Image: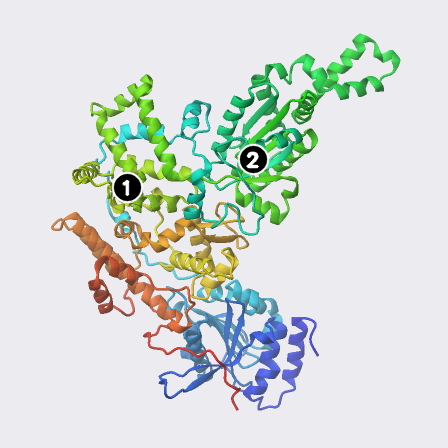
């Protein structure tokens, strides 16, 4: 009989247990009558998930001996939900207190201070976990259940706890706790790991970053042109959406001709500007207003148009150039063009706000703009108001009695009606747009930066745009991110069937830079006021020196050497604004060595080479250090992949493992690139990373653009959001973390859990007998040796290489060997083994010689 609930199943088992013979049951009957029953009917594991009698290579067996050991249960549900269960016969009583004392007992205490059946069963389960690559285990004799984990990163063995359920009555009394610990959803949520490591182990008190031990200081003034270059960069890279930049907008705007190549190379949403699963949108030609949402068909019929693109892809700039060209083509007759930028509004970033007030503010701004720009169609003019509200006035006249229709009384009532409508900007705007329609004047409304707001803000704005388009036949263009479009379609808050979607592709930033430089040079030549400001910033230095640097910068970005181009492109993704900011950071950083750049440039000119090979390291140094003497992640645009917590002992490699998994996932032909955060947590949890740390590191990577999301553009992300590897994340994984300059800088800002390594790096930093380049190299090597030891320990805890997931690859030894040659590998091997620092040592450490498992299953044991 199948029980109807877990509580009924436990009641059946209690009755069955009381009727057992005095000598109990053998192991096979224990499993059939008790363990199977609890796994299926109490905890919710399916029978097909049991994988009973799975076998593994025995300890020390050679390939010729083919000696096997059998694993009682290897519970597996999906890719990440796994649990090893070692079952003993029901008469094999575990030596536990007769009455429940505490739920948590240190695992080491169970191994040392209790009966032989417990210690043997636990050691056997731990061994199996390491061989099959599964984190959690249970040992049970059918009515007593002990659960824990075989390993956890940076958690010493004596800190790992076991959850103990003393008998079936204990399970019955605490049934929900039992289910919340060992059911498939609980294993997926890492409840067992959280319980076993009790929040993790505290980091040692000496854990510090080198920056915390050194005095703050100012960088050397290697960039003596920083101030005039700041002026030049402001000219070159200002936003083009203000009225003050009308000329620059016209001359520097990049049309879509080159954008397709940029997308092919750099778009993080590969192959399209829209997310997977979203119907393709019409492509806007950035160079003309005769295509897209501004053609005659749309202007006459009216439409709600969605202008879709990634952050920084040029949506606002596209709308700015569109406004300018439409005004040039149609002037102010036969066309009313209104625009509102929603970015600066207080409601934009608020989660709770007055919807009606926000709509009234937007409509009021549009009416005021119409008053200022179109005096012949002024929505506040008395004569126009009588026409705007002609229908309402006509209905008023009809409703009045003959005695109330005297001229004075009627005019008073009409004035009251008009004033009442004027006090409601939404009603006033709808009536005004209807008035324009009756006069055969096309109306277009541009709502920019809607995507900068919260989901509630976006939803309310969408509804306003759709209502205006449907009720007034105006063309309403709403600018939003592709992720917002995707979520609106999937979640239903945006009725995309009533919208027309167009996508805006970002231009290649090299073309943007080229046009901006050309424009800035001409502006400095012809604009007297700007020239005076520039001369003041020079402070007596020749302006030719600045122009020389501009030539160098242009050659770096526009020349044949693609290292820096690719670095900027991948770090910025499709965000042109961010790409320009990176260039400005390099140009104005005091760490940019101008004399060295000039010398390299002059040597290249003498050799008459067309390529100016500025080292990528020089560029990285400036954008990593920014305006500081040493690298600090909090003040840099570059993330530290090796950073850890100062409070809790966590892995130095959580960020790298996240990127490795997302990269592997993106390369799986039959898998979507997007993965729920919940699933990512499960995959990382299966190799010992706690859910709290994974989510924290994931959000940190999102802040730097290494990971992106369709469901929520900006972190923090919830466990239900979906994420994918960004263009920057792939660049970090494939290129940046192997860079010599990257490692030389992050060493100053990485928390270290080994006191000896921390002190050695600090002493080396102050060793004046060695030149600074040599000290920097040796510091980087010390950091990599420390990280290589930590990575080796972690991989040993996870188990044999055959049981590791295919995406998990060691990286530190490879980084060190690339930078320092075979000597690094030799130095690492000489120190290979358990680290002496805090946090080393954990249950399940091996020497790396445990043999692999085989994939097939034998017949059950006789």
- Decide which of tag 1 and tag 2 comes sooner along the chain: 2
In the rendered image, which residue does mark 1 sit on?
Answer: 622
396 displayed left or right of 800 = right
Measured as percent of width and height from the top left, residue 402 is found at 88, 13
Measured as percent of width and height from the top left, residue 595 is found at 18, 36
Q: Mark 2 falls on what kind of element?
A: helix
Within-10-Å neighbours for mark 1: few <14, some 14–19, many 20+: many
Q: Mark 1 falls on what kind of element?
A: helix
Residue 705 shows in the view: no
Measured as percent of width and height from the top left, residue 456 is found at 59, 40
561 above or below 544? below
What residue is shown at x 28% (from left), y 59% (from top)?
Answer: 815
Q: Give the quadrant of the N terminus.
A: bottom right
Depth check, front residue: 499 or 195: 499
Measured as percent of width and height from the top left, residue 130 is found at 41, 74
Labelled pair 1, 2 in contact (Cβ < 8 Å):
no
Depth check, front residue: 561 or 820: 561
325 above or below 36? above
The part of the image, by quadrant, that contains residue 197 is bottom left
The part of the image, by quadrant, that contains residue 785 is bottom left
What residue is shown at x 37% (from left), y 79% (from top)?
Answer: 851
| Identity of the residue furthest to the right in this view | 402
835 above or below 118? above
Is label 1 or label 2 in front?
2
Depth check, front residue: 432 or 421: 432
Residue 727 shows in the view: yes
What residue is shown at x 63% (from left), y 74% (from top)?
Answer: 41
What residue is shown at x 61% (from left), y 37% (from top)?
Answer: 462
Question: Between marks 1 and 2, how big is the CA–CA gap?
Answer: 41 Å
In the rendered image, which residue does mark 2 sit on?
Answer: 292
């Amino acid at each position: 009989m199948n029980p109807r609930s877990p509580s009924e199943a436990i009641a059946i088992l209690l009755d069955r247990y009381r009727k057992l013979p005095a000598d109990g049951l053998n192991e096979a009957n224990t499993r059939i009558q008790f363990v199977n029953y609890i796994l299926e009917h109490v905890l919710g594991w399916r029978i097909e998930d049991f994988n009973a009698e799975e076998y593994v290579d025995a300890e020390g067996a050679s390939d010729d001996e083919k000696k096997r050991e059998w694993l009682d249960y290897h519970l597996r549900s999906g890719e990440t939900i796994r649990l090893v269960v070692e079952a003993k016969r029901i008469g094999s009583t575990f030596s536990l207190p007769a009455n429940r004392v505490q739920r948590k007992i240190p695992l080491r205490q169970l191994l040392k201070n209790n009966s032989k059946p417990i210690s043997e069963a636990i050691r056997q389960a731990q061994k199996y976990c390491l061989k099959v690559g599964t984190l959690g285990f249970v040992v049970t004799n059918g009515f007593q259940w002990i659960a824990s984990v075989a390993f956890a990163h940076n958690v010493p063995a004596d800190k790992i706890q076991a959850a103990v359920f003393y008998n079936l009555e204990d399970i019955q009394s605490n049934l929900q706790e039992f289910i919340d610990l060992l059911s498939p959803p609980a294993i997926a949520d890492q409840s067992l790991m959280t319980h076993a490591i009790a929040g993790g182990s505290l980091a040692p008190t000496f854990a510090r970053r080198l920056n915390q031990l050194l005095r703050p200081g100012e960088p050397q003034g290697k960039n003596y042109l920083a101030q005039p270059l700041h002026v030049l960069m402001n000219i070159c890279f200002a936003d083009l959406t203000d009225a003050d930049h009308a000329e620059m907008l016209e001359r520097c705007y990049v049309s879509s001709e080159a954008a397709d190549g940029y997308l092919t190379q750099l778009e993080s949403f590969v192959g399209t500007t829209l997310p997977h699963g979203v119907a393709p949108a019409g492509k806007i030609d950035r160079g003309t207003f005769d295509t897209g949402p501004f053609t005659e068909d749309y202007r006459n019929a009216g439409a709600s148009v969605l202008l879709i693109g990634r952050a920084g892809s040029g949506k606002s700039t596209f709308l700015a150039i569109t406004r300018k060209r439409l005004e040039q083509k149609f002037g102010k007759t036969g066309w009313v063009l209104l625009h509102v930028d929603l970015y600066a509004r207080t409601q934009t970033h608020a989660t709770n706000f007055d919807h009606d007030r926000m709509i009234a503010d937007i409509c009021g701004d549009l009416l005021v703009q119409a008053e200022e720009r179109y005096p012949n169609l002024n929505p506040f003019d008395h004569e126009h108001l009588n026409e705007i509200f002609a229908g309402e006035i006509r209905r008023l006249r009809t409703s009045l009695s003959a005695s109330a229709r005297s001229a004075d009384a009627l005019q008073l009532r009409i004035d009251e009606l008009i004033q009442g409508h004027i006090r409601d900007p939404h009603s006033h705007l709808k009536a005004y747009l209807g008035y324009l329609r009756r006069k055969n004047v096309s109306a277009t409304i541009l709502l920019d930066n809607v995507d900068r707001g919260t989901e509630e803000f976006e939803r309310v704005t969408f509804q306003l745009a759709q209502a205006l388009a449907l009720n007034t036949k105006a063309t309403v263009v709403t600018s939003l991110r592709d992720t917002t479009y995707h979520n609106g379609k999937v979640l239903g808050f945006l009725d995309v069937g009533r919208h027309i979607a167009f996508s805006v592709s970002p231009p290649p930033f090299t073309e943007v830079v080229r046009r901006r430089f050309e424009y800035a040079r001409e502006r400095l030549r012809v604009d007297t006021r700007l020239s005076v400001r520039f001369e003041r910033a020079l402070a007596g230095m020749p302006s030719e020196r600045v122009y020389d640097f501009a030539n160098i910068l242009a050659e770096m970005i526009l020349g044949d050497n693609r290292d820096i181009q690719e670095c900027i492109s991948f770090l910025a993704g499709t965000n042109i604004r961010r790409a320009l900011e990176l260039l400005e950071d390099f140009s104005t950083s005091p760490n940019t060595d101008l004399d060295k750049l000039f010398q390299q440039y002059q040597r290249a000119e003498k050799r008459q080479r067309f390529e100016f090979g500025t080292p990528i390291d020089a560029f990285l140094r400036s954008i990593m250090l920014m305006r500081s003497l040493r690298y600090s992640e909090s003040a840099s645009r570059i993330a530290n992949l090796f950073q850890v917590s100062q409070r809790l002992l966590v892995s130095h490699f959580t960020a790298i493992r996240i990127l490795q998994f997302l990269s592997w996932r993106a390369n799986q032909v039959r898998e979507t690139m997007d993965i729920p955060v919940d699933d990512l947590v499960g995959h990382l949890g299966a190799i010992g990373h706690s859910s709290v740390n994974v989510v924290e590191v994931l959000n940190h990577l999102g802040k730097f653009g290494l990971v992106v999301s369709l469901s929520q553009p900006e972190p923090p992300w919830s466990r239900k959001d979906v994420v994918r590897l960004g263009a920057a994340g792939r660049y970090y994984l494939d290129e940046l973390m192997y860079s010599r300059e990257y490692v030389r800088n992050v060493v100053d800002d990485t928390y270290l859990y080994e006191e000896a390594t921390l002190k050695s790096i600090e002493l080396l930093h102050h060793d004046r007998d060695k030149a600074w380049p040599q000290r920097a190299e040796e510091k980087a090597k010390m950091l990599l040796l420390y990280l290589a030891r930590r990575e080796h320990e972690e991989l040993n805890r996870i188990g044999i290489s055959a049981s590791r997931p295919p995406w998990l690859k060691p990286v530190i030894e490879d980084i060190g060997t690339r930078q320092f040659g075979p000597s690094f590998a030799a130095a690492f091997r000489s120190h290979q083994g358990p680290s002496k620092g805090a946090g080393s040592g954990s249950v399940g450490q091996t020497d790396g010689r445990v043999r692999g498992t085989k994939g097939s299953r034998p017949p059950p044991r006789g």
